[in-house]
Image (tube, helix red, strand yellow):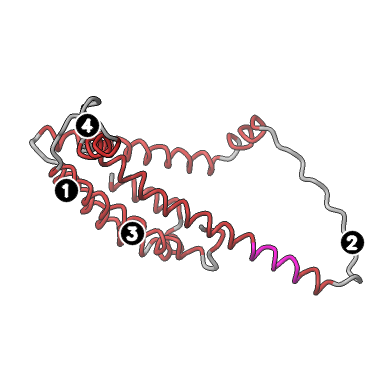
Amino acid sequence: VISHLNDRSKYGRLRLWGQLGFGLGSSAVGILLSKSKHRPYHHNAGHSFLEKLDNFWQSLTGYKLLFLTYACLSIPTWICIRAFHKLHNEKEKEKASKEVVEAGDQAPKVEKNEPSKVGVWNGIKVLFQDSDALLFFFLVLVVGISSGIIENFAYVRIREVGGTGKDMGLSRLVSSMAGAPMFWFSGPLTEKLGADRVIVLSLISY
């Protein structure tokens, strides 16, 4: 996504819509989960195919229904990704053909040497020699650990104190809405403070 943006500082504003969609989807799923009632699936119920299919459909409650919903929503997402990929390839071909036409036959031919392959261990050695890169990845690791703890145990705690699926979904919606200003102003903040300081502020927030 970043490689297709003319102004990469506006990536946060583009990412904002995904965050809001995530919050709205989570809240809707929470409401759906709280209203869903468990109904067991009986393999021997019904004689015809339509009756068996109706029995299976009625048994899709709880988390089964959520997984089915996710699968259905993944289909248009996959179609959009394929369409964007196709458009990208067409634009690249048009750009390459224009460059060939503009260059003409008079342009000198330049031999392209294949870039030398860098081993994984060589990259790791270079990484450990760069103190700034080590600090950056360490900060990312700490933020990831903090986020992972919240993502995995916050909803367990909500369930322990008597919360329902609706409460979990609404909490995710509030969390997504709280992150909206950060996505909107991420570009100006990064330009003014720098990426390292923004990460440090995120650590303090956690």
Query: Which residue was labeled with disc 1?
Result: 31
Q: Nearer the viewer, mark 4 or mark 3?
A: 4
* Alpha carbon separation for disc pair 4 and 3: 54 Å
| Residue drawn at 44 percent across, 50 percent down | 196
Q: Earlier in the sequence, mark 2 or mark 3?
A: 2
Q: Position of residue 73 (x, y in %)?
A: 36, 50
Amino acid carrying mark 2 in the image: Lys
Q: Earlier in the sequence, mark 2 or mark 1?
A: 1
Query: Which residue was labeled with disc 2?
Result: 109
* Magenta run includes residue 13: no
Q: Earlier in the sequence, mark 2 or mark 4?
A: 4
* Alpha carbon separation for disc pair 2 and 1: 63 Å
Query: Which residue was labeled with disc 4?
Result: 46
Q: Position of residue 163 (x, y in %)?
A: 11, 39
Q: Nearer the viewer, mark 1 or mark 4?
A: 4
Rate crowding at label 3 as few (under 14), some (14 to 19) or many (20 or more) other CA atoms within 10 Å.
some
Looking at the magenta stretch, what is its main secondary structure? helix
Q: Residue furthest front?
A: 48
* Alpha carbon separation for disc pair 2 and 3: 48 Å
Q: Nearer the viewer, residue 126 or 32?
A: 32
* Alpha carbon separation for disc pair 1 and 3: 27 Å
Depicted 147 relative to depicted 4: above or below: above
Q: Earlier in the sequence, mark 1 or mark 3?
A: 1
* Alpha carbon separation for disc pair 1 and 4: 31 Å
| Residue drawn at 51 percent across, 38 percent down | 134
Indicate left or right for 122 with 114 as reference: left
Q: Earlier in the sequence, mark 1 or mark 4?
A: 1
Query: Which residue was labeled with disc 3?
Result: 182
SS at circle 1: helix
